[in-house]
Image (tube, coloured by chain):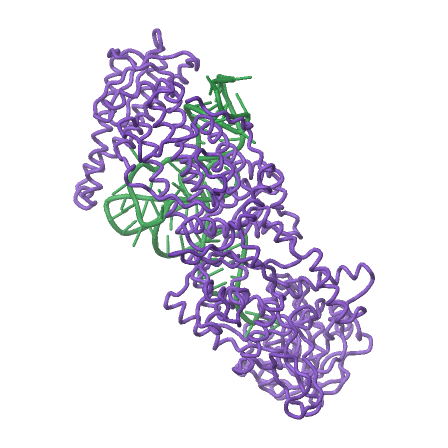
Chain colours: A purple, B green
Amino acid sequence: MPPRDFALPPQYNPHEVEAPLYQAWMSRGAFAPHPGPGREPYVIVIPPPNVTGVLHLGHGLNNTIQDVLIRFERARGRETLWLPGTDHAGIATQNVVERLIAAEGKTRFDLGREAFVERVWQFVHTTGNTILEQLKRIGASCDWSRTRFTLDPDYARAVREVFVRLWEQGLIYRGHRVIHWCPRCLTALSDEEAEFKETTGTLYYIRYPLADGSGHVTVATTRPETLLGDTAVVVHPDDPRGAPYVGKRVKLPLTSVEIPILADPSVEKEFGTGFVKVTPAHDANDFEIGVRHGLAMPLILREDGTMGDDGGDRQGDPAPRVPAELQGLDRFAARKQIVRMLEAQGLLAKTESHQHAVRRCYRCDSIVEPRLSDQWFVKMKPLAEPVLAAYRAGEFRFVPERWEATFEHWMENIRDWNISRQLWWGHRIPVFSCTACSHQWADREDPTACPKCGGALEQDPDVLDTWFSSWLWPFATLGWPEDTPDLRRYYPGHTLVTAPEILFFWVARMLMSGYHFLGKKPFTTVYLTGTARDMQHRRMSKSLGNGIDPLDVVGLYGADALRWTLIAGSALGADLILDPDDLEATFAPGRNFANKLWNIGRFILAQLPAQVTPLQRLDRATLTLSDRWILARTQRTIAEVTAALEQFRLDEATRRCFEFAWGELADWYVEAVKPRLAADAAGATAAHAVLAHCFDAALRLLHPVVPFITETLWQKLPGRAPDELLVTAPWPRPDPAWADETAEREFRLLQETVSAVRNIRAEYRVPPKSSVGLTIKATTEAVRALQQQQETIQRLANARVNGATSRAGAHAVLSDGSELFVDLGGSIDVALECRRLSDELTRLEKQLGSLSAKLANESFVSRAPPDVVAREREKEHAWRAQRDALASKIATLGCS
RNA sequence: GGGCGAAUAGCUCAGCGGUUCAGAGCGCCUGCCUUACACGCAGGAUGUCGGGGGUUCGAAUCCCUCUUCGCCCACCA
């Protein structure tokens, strides 16, 4: 049968293929879960990106991993659901729109709450789901029909239900304490949202004069402006330096206020002067001290970070504390000013440079101001405990395992969660108060009057922390609190893939909400990815400008190339170091591999007849060594790739596929099989069947990583129904009928033979086109089999196997001691040959020396496992044979 | 101040609880436009596996320690 004519171009063009293919997958509903008898669900919920976000490489990595897992399990017959969506991202989104209207010279306060929120919605509707479209371009096989948004009406119902239940359970309370306040975003933040950053600051030593005029005490602070809010100075009760002063009073500099010196055990004696200024309204630690000693807690910084008396718990404390010349000054300007004033009064003892961690807003990077205020908190201990118990019982796990300790430590030391934000964009807190009777309650519906007295009411003006909605993602997306079919079928999910930086923000909290509200874990495995970094190992970020835009890569090299590099380059949880300045070097390997696959396909497709005989119907007698070898390698590859994916070793799965497709199928089998195909002999039928089988397996195995190229080629294979798709085709299973260790061993010797001849040809500079003669002196059965591989050797090494036993020519020894004699057609260069052989002999002697020493070692022989000793003995035997053969050849040549 | 991770060829990394494990890709050198592929083919060079100690018959691989980087947590003002 003549080869079919496949006029494919020699270069794979991803851009022609990707968009139409993605459309085809979507229009056939390939990404939706397909229930069926015996099909177990497999569910991944996407970490919802910010609705206003754009795709960066971190998303690329993390979503490609999810897609690989989903495609793998889909092929394995699971009823897969990858549920996509976006997060309303309270502060982040509000900031974006605030910047937008700032360009119009307006603030949100100019617009008013309602108009502003309307404006944000507009923005979300117009540019909102860009990131989801971008995910499609990298091939993400999400079920887009189930796309969710954390501000959807259904979702809002879940958020409200959760709030009210927690309220009813007494787990939500109003806390009056010092919280993290962002003076730029004008909102409270949770502990997690106020990130520590190492900063070099100044430690100021300030003298506080004693009220009785008998001297002064010196305190140290990094925030001198807060001294205006001081209501005490404390020393450690056991500190002898402090003893004479406890009970005295000091005059607070720059004010007319007198404050006491008290003893408190929280003071670290080793740090600073031993005397600590206490600012209860502007420091969480000082707040605790203030509570212990019943101190006044005046606020001296306003919400926007400017100086000013702003209430607080004054308890008769004289106001104002902030001098007129400082009123309204920004805190950092005020700091400088205060330092100058102190200096002028001789109250600044000294300053020193100081390394410390400063909390910054995770959204705008402003330095966070601790501030006394009233906020809603969730009691976390009761939520954490069941999760810890379940974790210890092994109900869910982390990969890589090392995150487990981090998780456990955080959960064990969990602190209450400040969930109220002074923003406008988000879920409004459903707490209502009666203006008449002060009754306060949380409500599932919007009430019209006080249920107690019928009085007028007002709703809490604040919104909920954005994470208070995302922590419900695994079930709120499925319709909870309604008892929906989706909820019943797809909760709990299975694998959660995300970046470690949101382990506390999100992962830990989802576990808590899952156990608390549904009594079940939300997922079984948490896969924490690595971080994308540049060549200096800096995290890729917009502000550093060192990022790689995944869509640039798609545009240059195709989605498969991007995916390939991301997956192959990241070992389990390891960081991914990529070079933003050399995209070619970074992504060409993926492009090259896709192109290689394309060309393997091009060749095979051109050979295959319209009807390929199924493997099972082949007469085994027509199979050659190469056939049996590649079939055996195929089964082994299937098993190894499957195992690697099951263990989340995506890099290893990728590597194995690469070695198989390129290093075995293309480099050896395709080359070996060519003569048989050209001859159009009976053997061609078998060759066709083997090619089709092995290439088909390779495409199936590679599909999760490089879906576009594999789908494209797979559809062209003969025998495909027009509507058959690789994306929904079954995962291959290793067939023990084709396992063949003998063929693997024999073919390895064939490979050695070919390599040896090629090496000799290169060393002797034999032109590629001129044929050489080859004599094989076989010492084992395996090599005798080799002598029947003349056609293959001819093809691969351009060497004619001589029937005669010519012992002339260049020489090589195989690993089993068999010898090769390569007739180069004339006398050989004895000097070159001597050098070649004696180099080889030296190498062998060295190896053999250490091996023999090992075997001569009594304790090795007696203590090492017997099978190891046996293997070493065999090895020694083979190496001896090689050595002897080499040595005698060298003797024959008369090398000096 | 705690905890964790990394250190292997010029670069990015693999080596999954020990015995052809000293590897891959890129880069480099030498030949090849061999009718699938020059985004390719064939051949080749390159590393006292961060330093030091220890355990063992045997250690990139396990233990200790040091150095250098990175990350997370933490109320030393």
Name the outermost residue toward the top: A826
Q: Position of residue A687 (x, y in %)?
A: 36, 27
Residue A896 appears in the figure? no
Determine the residue positioned at 56% across, 30% down.
Answer: A11
B44, above or below A20, in the image: above
Determine the residue positioned at 46% across, 68% down.
Answer: A409
Residue A235 appears in the figure? yes
Left or right: where does residue A529 sit relative to residue A647? right
Task: Look at the image and tell me in which quarter the C terminus of chain A lies.
Answer: top left
Left or right: where does residue A190 sit relative to residue A522? right
Using the image as rendered, state which of residue A743 and residue A258 is in the foreground.
Answer: A743
A781, above or below A371, in the image: above
Determine the residue positioned at 40% across, 58% down.
Answer: A40
Using the image as rendered, state which of residue A708 and residue A512 is in the foreground.
Answer: A708
Using the image as rendered, state which of residue A123 and residue A291 is in the foreground.
Answer: A123
Q: Quadrant of residue A559?
A: top right
Q: Position of residue A36 (x, y in %)?
A: 42, 56
Q: Quadrant of residue A886?
A: top left
Q: Position of residue A377 (x, y in %)?
A: 58, 77
Q: Position of residue A617 (x, y in %)?
A: 31, 33
Task: Look at the image and tell me in which quarter the N terminus of chain A lies.
Answer: top left
